[in-house]
Image (spheres, rainbow, N blue to C red):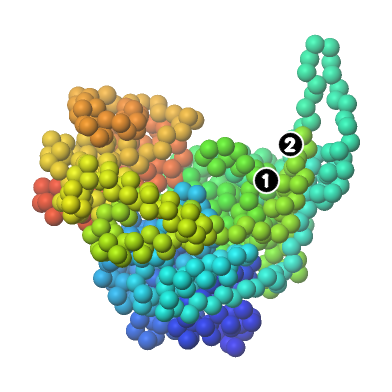
Amino acid sequence: MQYREFTLDKFQEDSVLELEKNNSVVVSAPTGSGKTLVADYVIEMDTKKGKNIIYTAPIKALSNQKYKEFSELFGKDKVGLLTGDITINQGAQIQIMTTEIFRNMAITGDSCLDKVSYVIFDEIHYINDIERGHIWEESIIFAPDHMRFLCLSATIPNADEFAEWIHSIKKDHIVKTIHHDVRYVPLHHSFYTRELGVSDLKEIKEIKDIPVQRKRRRGKKPERPEMPSHVELVNILKDKTPILFFTFSRLQCQKHAVEIAKKNFFRPDPEITRYVREKLADAPVEINRLESAKTLRMILPRGIGFHHAGLIPQMKEIVEGLFGMGKIKVLYTTETFAVGINMPAKTVCFDALRKYDGINFRYLNSKEYFQMAGRAGRRGIDKEGFVYSMLYLPNFEYAKVERFTSKDVEPLKSQFRIEVNAVINMEMQHSKEEIDRILTQSLYAFQNKEQGIRQIKATYAKLLKRLKSTGYLSQEGKVTWKGRFAASIFCDEVQISEVFSTDYYKNFSDYQILLYITCLVYEHRDKTRFYKRYPSKEMTDLKKKLKNHPILKADTRWRQMSKISAFVYPIMHGGDFFDILDLTNLLEGDIIRIYSQVLDRISQILKATDEPDLMMKMKRCRKIVEDCMKDISRI
């Protein structure tokens, strides 16, 4: 079967034939096997019939990438983008959005979904994400019954169970599972240690099992073995470029890239210099003064680059462009590159197989490992792909590493939880009988049977009681004005509603409003430094108000307000994004994320209210943030 210039593989053909029958489809196939072509097919098929399509992505970077890609494929007039802080062409036939945005529309019964025939869930295995996995479950549960699903994922061991769950709650759906387990470009997995160089796991295990007497000088601890060197590994792999080198630290990405560039492993390319100069020709002069930009301009001509969420969009676009052109030989990057951008390489390297997940250091799971490893091997270019993982012998655990690097064994497992917004919306939209039925429909209930259902119903009852005691629901269970406001707020529902659904905000200045919202979105990390703070009477008054509020006083985020003034005070007085960079050690992308989240919360408040005074205040605050960001592209 032909589609555009491609001859479809069997799994692609099987998928599109089911889509033509208006069935829901779960596609489980290795990374890089061509699942996105199935998405392209259903988009083209249904838009020609005058129907609308929604494409959801787990991260904003992938949403932005797909917006550009689909605009080229289907025409910019047919494509829209919704990411919370950005809205482009909202009435378009093809709407690209983060999964959170779709879930919010589904749970509130948004009429925009009435004409949507299919929703595409890209990277559906994100349902395993501990923090955000419940978003995917709610998206499927609350999606209108007329809507069909195309779920795309890297290999899912329990794809059939997942499809059965969808059918159990959408009984008029025929849900087909399409399995594809073969990679067209075979992967070779190897490991690199200081002691053995490139070898396999069994060789490393054998040397690990040999007792070693470490040298010990009098009065001193034994010397620890040296860490493996990424420089030595790249030197070995010079004939296997391009290389994607995954590193779980943004600063390490940059540090490693500079170290490799200094080795002059590759001949300088003047075309790269010209490309970068042309791309930045119209950029604000301040961008060229950024340390990250100066570093990239120095190392890119040598065939070396780095890419992570801490870069400004203009620089990420340059790196992506050069990598796509085959100009970058070694790219150090964080794991988001494996999700957000479809740019494979000949070789993938890992500088470690453990990462910090926000709580502690742990090994990768098989889904994470194969998502990244699967970027090795370019179809139609390479006969084979190569994966090399650096291991530090003293910490090496054979059984654990062998388990997640030999086969993708991670099943989809529910992370379902009920939050305030979901309870209020269910009370607003559904009868008691319907709510009782919905509470049995999660993947968690499907996988845990009666025990899971009891836990979910108990949590719901507990939240219901709390919402009645705090005035979001009446004692009779009717949704109050405060509750209706909170139904349109999808992050920090209580903290936002306690202020902006009541008269409490009326004594807040614009500065205090922005301080308050920025406190909500800022995620404190011990390594973050602020070089200047802006104490003021307005800040002192705001802290006092919050300290005296019966509900808000318990929130510990207000303790960071003095630091957070560095994000707000300068932009209230005409400062811009580049002024903020001088006040903290946060990377550019981290600051962009903070302001983007502030804009997202402002948009939610504007949607939730019809109070003219509040709307005017929010629009003023929005303009202050947008003016600060005017020279920074957010797509």
Q: At 46% from the left edge and 40% from the top edge, which residue is drawn?
A: 587
Image side of residue 122 versus residue 365, left or right: left
Q: Nearer the viewer, residue 277 or 43?
A: 43
**Residue 562 position by quadrant:** top left
Q: Residue at x 48, y 54 (%)?
A: 451
User: Label 2 belongs to which residue?
Assistant: 395
Label 1 to label 2, Cα distance in Å?
A: 11 Å
Tell me if label 1 and label 2 are in contact, CB under 8 Å. Answer: no
Q: Which residue is mark 1?
A: 353
Q: Can I make out residue 100 in this image?
A: yes
Q: Nearer the viewer, residue 579 or 130?
A: 130
Q: Within the image, what quadrant is residue 512 found in?
A: top left
Residue 261 coordinates in the image, percent (x, y): 66, 44
The amino acid marked with disc number 2 is Asn
Q: Is residue 462 left or right of residue 127?
A: left
Residue drawn where x is 47% and y is 73% of the image: 167
Quick one: SS at disc 2?
Answer: helix
